[in-house]
Amino acid sequence: MERIQTAIAKGRAARQQLATIQPAKLPVAKDDGRVTAAWATLGEAPFNRQVFEEARIVAHVPGPAATAFDLVRTNMMRHLRENSWTRVAITSPSGGCGKSTTCLNLAFSLARQTELRIVVLDLDLRRPNIMRALGLNRAPHLPDVLSGEEPPEHGLVRIGANLAFGVNTKAVANSAEILSSTQTGAAIDAIEERYRPDVMLFDMPPVLVTDDTLSFLDQVDCALMVAASEQSTVAEIDRAGKELADHTAVLGVVLNKCRYMDEGEGYGYDYSPR
């Protein structure tokens, strides 16, 4: 653990030093046409509503089902803008908490704000879920980009005009080594430079299962933890929260799979077009 913390500290210091230099060379807010062209040339995947419903992806359209994700979106964007942050790791204490589903719904909720560009990278390399959830039969293999074997444009697939995904077609054995490598950091920097996303979401492995997430946290600005009601214990949430807070800023905890809510806890205004 001490080795990981030392590596993370060095990586964060390098990123902070780069951040003080980069804006003068490459203003993030400026789009001279190359960014728009880069997005336009990405391969586009079909928008399959039936597949999305089966995967519990509901935030691609406004309505009561999307409200909870929209609230998370609004609160998250406030913190990102206040701190000039872009990169958000989404994780959980243990498996089965619904972090990938939460990540996807948050991505589609963000994408409904058409002025934003969003990139989602599936970095749960041992148990990738996003490709299946999106119903993709064929897609680029993101680890090939992370390893430097393929350029950034060969690692992403677009759904709609402003939402792109980097997915895994299969599990990889050396996930910890990939996530902690300087090559992976350089590849993610290249993706960010080419596509200039307003938000990058990283679907990460559970914190308490492997060291994959902790070894990668020097590459992100903050983290969001997803816990499962009646599954995640207070001790697990507390331990995972402390692990995250030791390495990055923690935006908060999303309580998922909550079956019982008081009457006043829901948002009671349904939108009905007239």
Image: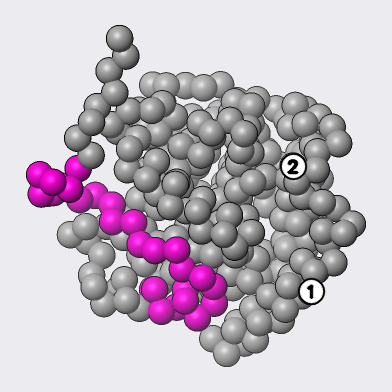
Is disc 2 placed on a helix, strand or loop?
helix
Q: Residue at x 74, y 70 (%)?
A: 15
In screen coordinates, is 119 left or right of 144? left
- Indicate the position of residue 85 as horizontal and vertical percent values: 61, 59
Q: Residue at x 74, y 42 (%)?
A: 195
Toward the viewer: 115 or 192? 115
Q: Is residue 26 visible?
A: yes
Q: Is residue 139 visible?
A: no
Q: Residue 207 colored magenta?
A: no
Q: Point out the stretch of residues depicted in magenta.
A: 240-266
Q: Given contact means CB atoms under 8 Å apart, are the residues at marks 1 and 2 in contact?
A: no
Q: How is the image coloured?
A: one colour
Q: Which residue is mark 1?
A: 17
Q: Residue 265 colored magenta?
A: yes
Q: CA distance from mark 1 to mark 2?
A: 22 Å
Give residue 50's quadrant in the image. top left
The quadrant of the picture occupied by the C terminus is: top left
Q: Which residue is mark 2?
A: 195
